[in-house]
Each structure stands twice: as C-alpha cells, then as structure tokens.
Amino acid sequence: MGKFIGTALAMAAAVAVSGLGLQITQIEFVLTVEQGTSYQLTFAVRNDSEAPQVVSLYLGDWDRDINGVNRFYPVGTIPRSLSPWLSLSHTQLPLAPGEAREVTVTLTIPSPDQQTLAGTYWGIIFVQGEPRPVRREGATVMAIERFGVKVYATIAGTEQPNGEVKGLEFIPQEEGLKVEVLYQNTGNVHSWVEGVVEVVDRTGTVVESVPLERFPVLPGAQRLISASLPPLPAGIYQVRAVLDYQGEVLVAGVRVLRVS
C-alpha cells in the first residue's frame, strides 16, 4: 500500500457534520499523490437517530456552477473524474441507534503506463440514510438525508496554477454600484482565489478598495463573484479587479467607469 501523502491537508477538513439522524467525521480529502500508488482514506458514520437504519454509500461526480453551487452527476461524467479510481469497503452500512462504524475508501491512481495524468482530479462519496418521516409546515413528508465526502487528488510535480479575469460588469444599485467579476481557472489545479476590487481616480489614487471573499475554482471552471461599491463623486475612474490564485503572478481586469 502506498504512502498517504495528503494526511496534513485531509486532517484539516476533518470535522463532524450532522443532520437529521446521521453524522460523518470527514467532509473532504485533499491529497497530493503519485501515479501507480494506492491510498486508503477513512471516515466514520454515526447513526444519531433513535431507530436503526441501513446507510447506503455510493460514488458520483460533481462540479460547481458559475455561482459556486455544487452540481452532481453519475460516475465518469466529468473529464477529470477520479471516482472510477475509488473503491468502497461498504456499500451498505447497518447501524443501530447511537452506533458508529468506519468506512475505508481505496484510491488507486493509474500508473504512467496506463494513463498520463497532470493536475487535480476529483470525485465524491455519497453517504445516504433511509427515508424517514419529518414534520414540515404542518404536514409529514418523507426526507432522505445525504452527505457528500469530496476527494481531490493532485498528481505531485505536475501542478500548473493559472487564472484569468475574463470580464467586469457594472450593475447600478439604489446606493452605489455592483461590480461583477468573471474569473476562469486556466490552470490544471483546484485553486482558492482571493482578491480585491479597486477604484482609481484620474490622479492614480485608489479611492475605494473592496476585498473579495476567498473562493474555490476547479480546473477549467469559471466563477462569477461580485463586490458592492458605495456612491462615487462625478468623474472618470478605472475599476480594476486584482486576483491572487496562489501562483507566481497576480491577474487583473480593468474597465473604465464614468459617473455623472
């Protein structure tokens, strides 16, 4: 069995997440891996309900839309899917009330002879409980509880982070202006991006600066993020979005703004 290179990063994502009657101890694994090597990942599932239930485990694919909302697909849908490389120790997990059991997931990275790989690949392990009645708005409905454990694996030594600001749009508001920034991850690794939107007057002075909330972007994906600017005095300005994708350089987009 190969060495689990991503231990420190994976442990950073180890938090207990609970819902109606289930709890899981891991929400994601972030790994740096070598081709031709296998890795064992473990997490626990606990039944916090008062009734026994059989928990189902299965694999899937996922990505995010332009607003960062998760989307889910069958295995093998995403070009960079690693779900075909995953195998589960259990697909059904009977749990008594209060019982917790460990799940082992084996991730087997294809060897260079089998496939040439570079950058980040990802997949998801779904943990799903049995349907159960829940009272909502005076009615009883059947609810199914489901969690997803995300797995990211980046091939060591192949990382090529890169990004590009594709555009800036101005949307008038009752007070001030909303600036929408379209960013694309043009590299091959999953990135966390942070940045700022600045307003520069004709003298070169930065008159407004609004930080952008840090956001994740998958390889090849686009994200639409926004910042709200306060009302500005009449004049001509440059609005620039400067983003840091944790690479060697910053990327920026600039657009002229005329305020009358």
Image (cartoon, rainbow, N blue to C red):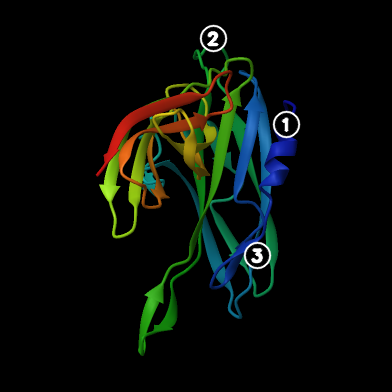
The answer, for residue 220, to whether it is visible in the render is: no
* Residue in the image at 50% along x and 39% along y: 216
Mark 3 or mark 2: which comes first in sequence? 3
Can you give x and y, in whole percent of width and height, for residue 8 in the image?
75, 37
Could you give the CA–CA distance between mark 3 and mark 2, rounded to whole angstroms?
40 Å
Q: Which amino acid does label 1 sit on?
A: Phe
- The answer to whether residue 49 is left or right of residue 168 is right
Mark 1 or mark 2: which comes first in sequence? 1
Question: Label 2 neighbourhood size at 10 Å, few (<14), some (14-19), many (20+)?
Answer: few
Question: Label 3 neighbourhood size at 10 Å, few (<14), some (14-19), many (20+)?
Answer: many
Please give the residue where the numbered disc 1 appears in the rendered image: 4
Report helix, strand or loop for mark 1.
Answer: loop
- The answer to whether residue 87 is left or right of residue 72 is right
What is the number of the mark on residue 97? none
Could you give the CA–CA distance between mark 3 and mark 1, rounded to whole angstroms?
25 Å
Rendering quarter of residue 169? top left
Give the residue at the far bottom of this rendering.
Answer: 138
Quadrant in the picture for the C terminus: top left
**Nearest-to-viewer mark from 1 and 2:** 1
Rendering quarter of residue 203? top left
Question: Label 1 neighbourhood size at 10 Å, few (<14), some (14-19), many (20+)?
Answer: some
Residue 4 or residue 178, whichever sits in front: 178
Please give the residue where the numbered disc 2 appears in the rendered image: 113
Please give the residue where the numbered disc 3 appears in the rendered image: 46
The answer, for residue 113, to whether it is visible in the render is: yes
Q: Which amino acid does label 3 sit on?
A: Arg
